[in-house]
Amino acid sequence: MADMTAAWEPVPRSRTFELVLARIEEQIVAGRLKVGDRLPPERELVDMLGVSRAAVREALRVLEAQGVLRSRVGTGPSSGTVIAAMPDAALTQLLRLHIALANFPMGDVVEARATLERASARLAAELVTEDGLERIRDPLLRMDDASLPREQFNDCDTDFHVAIAEAGGNRLMADMTVAVRNAVRHTLLTVFNKLDDWEEVASRLRAEHHAIYEAIAAGDTEAAGDLVEAHVRGFHRDIVKKVMDG
Amino acid sequence: MADMTAAWEPVPRSRTFELVLARIEEQIVAGRLKVGDRLPPERELVDMLGVSRAAVREALRVLEAQGVLRSRVGTGPSSGTVIAAMPDAALTQLLRLHIALANFPMGDVVEARATLERASARLAAELVTEDGLERIRDPLLRMDDASLPREQFNDCDTDFHVAIAEAGGNRLMADMTVAVRNAVRHTLLTVFNKLDDWEEVASRLRAEHHAIYEAIAAGDTEAAGDLVEAHVRGFHRDIVKKVMDG
DNA sequence: AACCAAGCAATGGTCTGACCAAGACCCCAA
DNA sequence: TTGGGGTCTTGGTCAGACCATTGCTTGGTT
């Protein structure tokens, strides 16, 4: 007799749109659909798969939410439904909601940021090009303007960290870094706006950013990683927690 | 005159389902919708928002793809659409497709695994409980069975790494680790099945796994991290690459 | 009184068919 | 040659109907 200790979980009854989804994913995984390829028009998929247009559209919506598709109305080369690759936006959105749902406590997010950005900074210190350095320097210098409003400072801060992540040349790590950083963008802005000693905090961040930049530019792997990790952890420990608890 | 260097990107014309999506996300971010809460039935949302049911359903489908919702037919307490929290499945699915689309080259994935699992192992060595240790030990011991088919060995391998990630107590890092590991599950299985010297490889993996387990059990943070990183990088360098290139 | 089965109502799932709106292309007139 | 309007393709939206599942209610039977 069969093993009865394992629960007899009901087979998840496939909904129509999931079958459509499976067909499309199948072609992606098999490599028959590549980035830039166009899918058949919705109405053709309806005929080919023998399902309603609503089912097709729900499947497409899922893939769009995963950053795999892009749809445009009209005729011509750029119209229709095409395979695209926008994982970072999809990742960001996903993390944002789950952080809001408190599935991911802020402490976990900080730990993840410290881990990812430390690794990104180390890669950057090893592999960065002159072009990459310039992309890091731009937001860095813009933050030096003392009259910069806090919201724009926050955006530059994001750009700075994103530029470092991308300088390492690892798209997956960069996208995860971007997603995690973006997911807490609103939270950080709220914190910034509550600060009484804004100028003091901004000065500290500027100094830390400059030190990180110097380490990366100098190709000092260890220093770059340590400084970024300390930057992320220190900022949350000393500033974010104080504001959110106090 | 305004700055003309920045491209005048067209404002993305909001589609109806995106408006619905925005309304629901709004309530999640504001904390008015928590895990376990039920959304109004689709037909009520249609009345409240003044849109078609198709639009509502497309929005719900997106949230479901993000692991935020769970829908069930019928009446009663467990039916309807409820806020759930299944980020790891959603993350896995997302990464799987993007890896298939080659947005994320295998080298990047390995780098990310090394980074995430190193950090997870360090956390585990510091924080693991007796219960957590047992969850790590279970797949470890099952892999010691030399007659275990390769596919099940692969699953146990996954379970082993997942258990370590979860032992650290950081849900976000654990979910990212799980997602990345799951996303390459199929690839690894293919590699396993192509190996001529399977027993030799399995022995090596077993030995490395045992060493990792011992380090975590002993609370040796540095060793645990180093061993896991070496395990991940070494496996891909020595085995996966050889099979996929040869 | 206890119990079981038939029926009912609520809810998500699916389909049909229609129309709208954006965008590119074609063709004709100036 | 050029400008403009028509038209076709394509995604976006909607209304309304029916199906399938599920849990609860109800009423009869023992």
Image (cartoon, coloured by chain):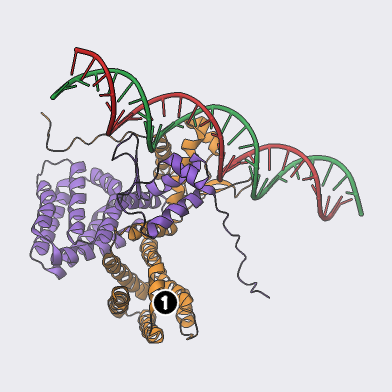
Chain colours: A purple, B orange, C red, D green
Where is residue B94 shown, x and y percent of the image?
38, 56
Which residue is rendered at x = 25% and y = 34% of the image? B10
Q: Is residue B135 visible?
A: no
Q: In the image, is A233 to the left or to the right of B169?
A: left
Image check: C7 left or right of A185?
A: right
Residue positioned 17% across, 53% down in the render: A160
Label 1: how many residues lie within 10 Å, few (<14), some (14-19) or many (20+)? Answer: few
Q: Above or below — where is B144 with respect to B180?
A: below
Viewer-side residue, B28 vs A10: A10
| Residue B129 coordinates in the image, percent (x, y) | 44, 74
- As drawn, B33 above or below B171: above
Give how far across and how far down residue B207 sits, in percent.
Answer: 37, 86
Front residue (pair B170, A136): A136
Left or right, residue A19 beside residue B6 = right
Location of mark 1 (residue): B193
- As displayed, is residue A121 above or below residue B134? above
Label 1: which secondary element: helix
Query: Residue A9 versus residue D8: which sits nearer the camera?
Result: D8
Q: How many marks?
A: 1
Amino acid tagged 1: Asn
The percent position of residue B39, horizontal first and vertical second, equals 52, 42
Q: Is residue A242 visible?
A: yes
